Image (cartoon, rainbow, N blue to C red):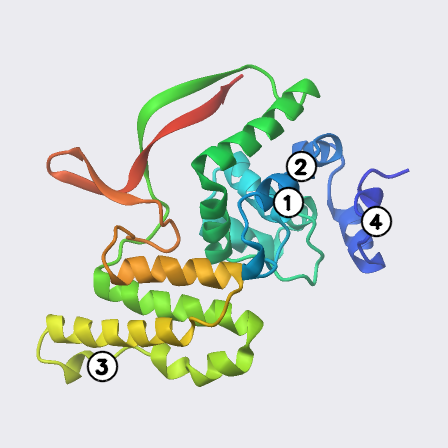
Amino acid sequence: MRLIGHQNPQANFFDQEIFSRMIPEDHPLVLIKKYVDFSFVNEEAARHSTPELGRPSFSSEALFRVLFLEVWANLSDLQVCRELRYNVLYRWFCGLGWEDEVPDDTTLVVFRRRLGEEGFRRLFEHVVRQAKEKGLLRGKWAIVDGTKVVAHAAVKNHLSLVREGRKRLLRVLARYDEQAARELELLAEPERDADYADHEQLLAAELLKGQELLNRLEDYQQQDLAELRELYRKAVELQGVASFSDPDARWGFKKKDEPFLGYKAHVSRPWT
């Protein structure tokens, strides 16, 4: 009996054929998927969800598997989403069929924020503990304090951030209401720079469009859309958000004259 062909009983015949022929059975991710139980993630993540905001587009387990891949392969949100478009092994590991949609970086952002730092660490440590018990991870784990981590995000000024956020909001809205997204397309279009005397006037006009879009989306209660809407509101009001792809990143200084967008973190790395 082949290992790959019996991992997902709900996969269609076409997916089973692709996965069974293209995925090496001795790959570490194959062994992790076979021996490590990720199902506990759904129950844990449910504690951080708000039922009235609607059902997420992807299961919590699938999204956490994507985040696990980020750590395992040292990828950013954008990079792992790009890999999922064509990487057969990654799609199979996350339980995504060949024709299934893949989460975008915004979905990963809101899911990570929903779990919170402590929630994510608790889930990740549970997975690591299982993997070590099965002999899939060896060695000790060390904690490195106060490491400077530069965000995997393009640095944008406030004007660019305000413009980008409107487009992201409409992309998420289109998942639930395509007609409304089309009707609001003009609110995502940037103002013409040449129509304004200076940067301050241009930014003020962009902020007005952003606020109008926020107002128009107030009645939508889907969780990912609601969380992105709140993130965008903070960006508009200059409440510390400097990137939508990595909203936890903040401006900091390693040296007086060397600013960076990122964060200082306690990083766990394996020693083999």
Q: Identify the element where label 1 is drawn.
A: helix
State the CA–CA distance, disc 3 to disc 2: 50 Å
Q: Which mark is residue 61?
A: 1
The residue identified by callout 3 is 192
Q: Position of residue 28 (x, y in %)?
A: 66, 31
Please name which of the two marks, 1 or 3, marks the residue nearer to the observer: 1
The residue identified by callout 2 is 40
Q: Residues within 10 Å of mark 4 (few under 14, many from 20)?
A: few
Q: Residue at x 44, y 46 (%)?
A: 113
Asked whether the residues under the numbered discs 4 and 3 touch, taking CB atoms below 8 Å apart as contact, a structural biologist would say no
State the CA–CA distance, disc 2 to disc 1: 8 Å
State the CA–CA distance, disc 2 to disc 4: 19 Å
Name the amino acid, label 2: Phe
Q: Position of residue 262 (x, y in %)?
A: 30, 41
Q: Identify the element where label 4 is drawn.
A: loop
Q: Earlier in the sequence, mark 4 or mark 1?
A: 4
Asked whether the residues under the numbered discs 1 and 3 touch, taking CB atoms below 8 Å apart as contact, a structural biologist would say no
Q: Residue 89 or 253: which is nearer the viewer? A: 253
Name the amino acid, label 1: Glu
State the CA–CA distance, disc 1 to disc 3: 43 Å
The residue identified by callout 4 is 9
Asked whether the residues under the numbered discs 2 and 1 touch, taking CB atoms below 8 Å apart as contact, a structural biologist would say no
Q: Earlier in the sequence, mark 3 or mark 2?
A: 2
Name the amino acid, label 3: Arg
The image quarter in which residue 99 lies: bottom right
Seen in the picture, residue 187 relative to 27 is either above or below; the reply is below
